[in-house]
Image: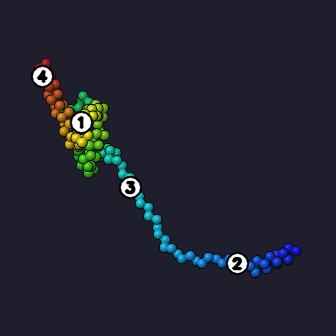
């Protein structure tokens, strides 16, 4: 009985037209996907530490030479990294700590934004920490001589 059903099934199904397979599709040229990798560069503020840029705290123990060395070293590092003037300013400010950062924050709060440049920073830093420290140091030495 099963054999008869199977034979009948094959006869019916083979008589029906089998659906034809679609023709072989034309091969499209395979174009490799191009993935652009953007190199994510570290911010300059992170890079300056690799070039041995130091933080500036403006402690009582700092002298004129230390402040001058810090400024020259910071300028050198920014030059080595080919920083634009705005980047140089950001890097220098990122190295200020404690009272020196407070001094800068106070200064820029009363100065028009367009006046705040790298050159402005250098000039004001020299006025505050190099020229003023030099005068303070000489005054202190004078007082010590007078008392001694």
Of labels 1 and 3, the one closer to you: 1
Check disc 3 and report the residue beneath it: 39
For label 1, the crowd category at 10 Å Cα-Cα, with few meaning under 14, some 14 to 19 and many 20 or more, is few
Residues tagged 4 and 3 counted as in contact (Cβ below 8 A): no
Of labels 3 and 2, the one closer to you: 2
Q: CA distance from mark 3 to mark 2?
A: 57 Å
In the rendered image of this protein, does residue 144 appear above or below residue 75? above
User: 147 or 79, which is in the foreground?
Assistant: 79
**Picture quarter containing residue 20?**
bottom right
Secondary structure under tag 4 reads helix
Secondary structure under tag 2 reads loop
Secondary structure under tag 3 reads loop
**Picture quarter containing residue 59?**
top left
Residues tagged 4 and 2 counted as in contact (Cβ below 8 A): no
For label 2, the crowd category at 10 Å Cα-Cα, with few meaning under 14, some 14 to 19 and many 20 or more, is few
Check disc 1 and report the residue beneath it: 111
Sequence order check, earlier mark of 4 and 2: 2
Sequence order check, earlier mark of 3 and 2: 2
The tag on residue 143 is: none
Q: CA distance from mark 1 to mark 3?
A: 37 Å
* Residue beneath the point at 13% across and 18% down: 147
Q: Position of residue 77 (x, y in %)?
A: 26, 46
Check disc 2 and report the residue beneath it: 18
Q: CA distance from mark 4 to mark 2?
A: 116 Å
Check disc 4 and report the residue beneath it: 145
Sequence order check, earlier mark of 1 and 3: 3
């Amino acid at each position: 009985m099963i054999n008869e059903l199977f034979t009948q099934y094959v006869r019916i199904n083979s008589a029906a037209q089998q659906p034809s397979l679609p023709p072989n599709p034309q091969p499209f040229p395979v174009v490799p996907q191009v993935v652009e990798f953007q190199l994510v560069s570290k911010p300059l503020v992170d890079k300056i530490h690799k070039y041995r840029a130091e933080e500036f705290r403006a402690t009582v123990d700092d002298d004129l030479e230390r402040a001058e060395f810090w400024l020259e070293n910071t300028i050198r590092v920014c030059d080595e990294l080919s920083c634009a003037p705005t980047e140089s300013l950001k890097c220098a400010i990122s190295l200020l700590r404690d009272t020196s950062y407070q001094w800068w924050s106070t200064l820029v709060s009363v100065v028009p934004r367009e006046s705040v440049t790298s050159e402005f920073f250098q000039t004001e830093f020299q006025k505050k920490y190099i020229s003023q420290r030099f005068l303070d140091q000489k005054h202190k030495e004078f007082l010590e001589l007078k008392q001694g």
